[in-house]
Image (cartoon, helix red, strand yellow):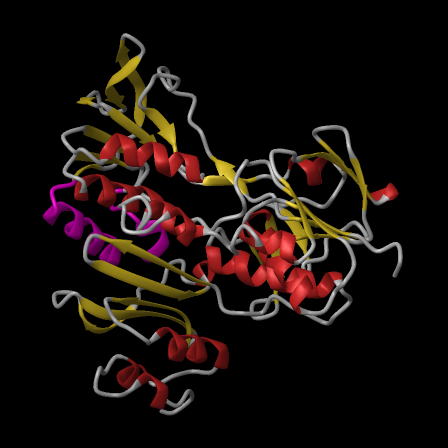
Amino acid sequence: MAHEHMVIVGGGLAGATAAKTLRAEGYEGPVTLVAAENRTPYIRPPLSKEFLLGKAEADAALVVPDDWYGENDVELLLENPASRIEPADHAAVLADGRSLHYSKLLLATGARPRTIPLPGADLDGVMTFRTFDDSVRLQNLLKNGGKKVVMIGSGWIGMELAAAARTYGNDVTLLGLEDIPLSAAIGPELGAYFQRLHEDQGVTFRLPASAAGIDGQNGSATAVRTSTGETLPADVVIVAVGVVPDTALGEAAGLAIRNGILVDAGLRSSAPDVLAAGDVANALHPFTAEHHRSEHWANALNGGKVAAKSMMGQDAQLDVVPYFYTDQFTLSMEYSGFPSLTFGITPVIRGSLDDGSFIAFWLREGMVVAGMSVNQRRVQKPIKALISTRTPVNVTKLTDPGVPLDELQPGEQ
């Protein structure tokens, strides 16, 4: 016990939650959290939502208050990321040359924005979106309105940023590779619902289309050339085409890698005493008996808790139903379930898309595997319960708004 030292590599939600959980679970030994950024750990959802829109202060994004680390004897090393880990020696070497010997190591290095090798990508006004500083920069670019914004990417972040840009009074054009935005995630019918919402608010879509290059003048972006031959005027160009897990440390250390660092349900990697959590981890989920990598905040939050308990030798598993949410204009959406199990399935609808308040359910073999609620409150708990039961449901009752979800009995025919 005297030689124990828990080292957490990564200053995001998963890493900070792991540190918090270690202390909450009674671990009294040394804890060191190393981070690449110069900011204390924060959560990402507000960056593309309420903080970006000026509806929340910076402190609202913090995982814990700044003084928590000192008060709980957690050594926080900012702007000093790990440069390599050495599992055989139980050591993490930091950028400043310092070597930390660990009893358990958690890799929570997250993900980095996927980039496109576009001519003109280095011009002023062109950016990706991932960090707190990115959100501050984008808010400053958008907040006075009147800009011509081209969004490259029609996924969740691209749609959220397009909504924020338009809310500030900018002209927004969105490019995407799909015929319908979000259709790969939620299907064409629901993707079209989100597209109509944006179009009603003045967002213009070019689908399917990709960026071929960015033109500029005096070092600043002026237009985006598309794969369809169109030239779109642009003052601000945002590339939001997904992220890739930051597995560099794990790869160099010889850990098993497949779309992230492969870990078991307790988030243990192929190297003894090395764990991974958050965006970088491809974890075995007991529900599906398959590996899943999630880039949403709930996964980082729950993964940090499980990793900390596993580091302490407790029997812990990341077995919760995945969850995420989005806010776009007046729409509030929450989603629970396993996207990998919904491919090729047409959802059934409870309520009406025309009314702007509904729940979509994806069923496989009669069992609910995912549920998405739009502009409905306090329904995710019963949705998760329906998913967790893993038994067939009565579809007629499932889609009847008059039957309370928490009274719906799985298996009832």
- Residue at (79%, 59%) from the top-left corner? 29
Q: Is residue 360 left or right of residue 336?
A: left
Please give left or right for residue 215 compared with residue 10 in the image: left
- Residue 303's spot in the image, x, y percent? 59, 60
Q: Main secondary structure of the magenta part?
A: helix
Is residue 83 located in the magenta-colored stretch of the structure?
A: no
Residue closest to the eye, 278 or 401: 278
Magenta residues span 179-203
Q: Does 234 sit left or right of 97 as displayed? A: left
| Count of numbered marks | 0
Q: Is residue 54 above or below residue 218?
A: below
Please, is residue 262 above or below residue 368 in the view? above
* Residue 69 pos. (x, y %): 62, 53
Say above or below: 200 vs 366. above
Image point (79%, 49%), residue name: 271
Q: Is residue 290 above or below residue 203?
A: below
Residue 293 x %, y %: 54, 53
- Residue 266 in view: no
Question: In the rendered image, is residue 150 in sight?
Answer: yes
Q: Residue at x 56, y 44 (%)?
A: 110
Looking at this view, name the residue that lies furthest to the top: 218
